[in-house]
Each structure stands twice: as C-alpha cells, then as structure tokens.
Image (spheres, rainbow, N blue to C red):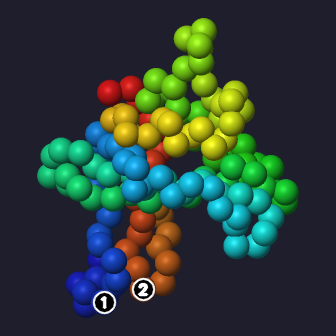
Amino acid sequence: MNMAVENELKGKPPIPAGEYQVIVEDQGFKGFSPNKKGTGENLQLTYKVVGGEFDGRLIFANYCVTHTVSPIAQEISRKQLDGYLAAVGATNNDGETLTYETLPSKHRFGEYINNPLLVDVDIEKKAQAGFYPNNRITAFRVL
C-alpha cells in the first residue's frame, strides 16, 4: 500500500486475518433497527477481541435479519447468526441448539451475549473511499 495514501486513511487498520477469541458485551448489543431503505430490519453487534496482541479491538457486524427485497441477504445473515448461537451454546429446554428461526422471540437474542467464542476474521476486499478496509467474521466456533 502506498504510504502517502495510507497516512490519509480514516479509522484504524484492520486486524490481520486469523482466529480470535471475542465477546459481545452488553454495550456491543445494539439491538434491532430498520434498515436505511425501510425494506427490512438489521441486528447490529460489536465483537470485542479478548486477549492477545489485538486485545480490545472491535469488529462491527450488521446482520440483515429481515429483507423484503433480498431474501438471499436475509438468508445469509440468519445463517451467520445461527453460527453465533451455536458457538455460544444457545439451547432450548430439550438441549437442542437454537437457531434464529427457533428463538422463542427475536428480542430474546440479547440473552445470548456476554459469552466468549472463537471466530475466524478476514479483511474485506473493498474499502469505502478514504477508509481502511473492515474486518468481517467468516466463521464461529465454541471456545
């Protein structure tokens, strides 16, 4: 990367791709909100890296949990949230792993934060003009 251009970028450089222990704390659970175009609803989570060289760094994620125009975006987001729920051990009374679809209420999602988990992190290929590229979580695992 050109050093002159890098010095002009806003934000923090992304953390290197790899496996990290993270947690979504209370303040990292932003809850559900309508998307900008009014075509669906997003769930915003902020993951905090726990331990290691990048302790305390944040990874922001926006999940499109309902979308009236793009069912594919909705499906991808729900599968990612299913991975999160499995990694934090979210189960029903019968001990079966919960998915986004089987949550008793989407508003109970907040019950499954404050649990450490392992994630695989990658760096997005494209960055917004003037900013460093973002990190993104590609997989969730039990700690």
Residue 102 lies, with reference to residue 16, above or below; the image says: above
> Which residue is rendered at x = 56% and y = 55% of the image?
31
Q: Amino acid at mark 2?
A: Gly
Under tag 2, what secondary structure?
loop
Residue 70 lies, with reference to residue 96, above or below; the image says: below
In screen coordinates, is 129 left or right of 81?
Answer: left
Q: Are marks 2 and 1 in contact (CB under 8 Å)?
A: yes
Residue 82 lies, with reference to residue 48, above or below; the image says: above
Residue 81: % across, % down: 58, 40
Residue beneath disc 1:
8
Residue 43: % across, % down: 60, 54
Closer-to-camera residue (125/88): 88
> Which residue is rendered at x = 78% and y = 55% of the image?
67
| First of labels 2, 1 by sequence position | 1
> Which residue is rendered at x = 32% and y = 27% of the image?
143
The quadrant in which residue 50 appears is top left
The tag on residue 130 is 2
Under tag 1, what secondary structure?
helix
Q: Amino acid at mark 1?
A: Glu
Find the distance from the CA under tag 2 to the CA under tag 1. Answer: 7 Å
Residue 84 showing in the rendered view: no
> Which residue is rendered at x = 68% and y = 30% of the image?
104
Residue 139: % across, % down: 46, 38
Residue 61 lies, with reference to residue 103, above or below; the image says: below
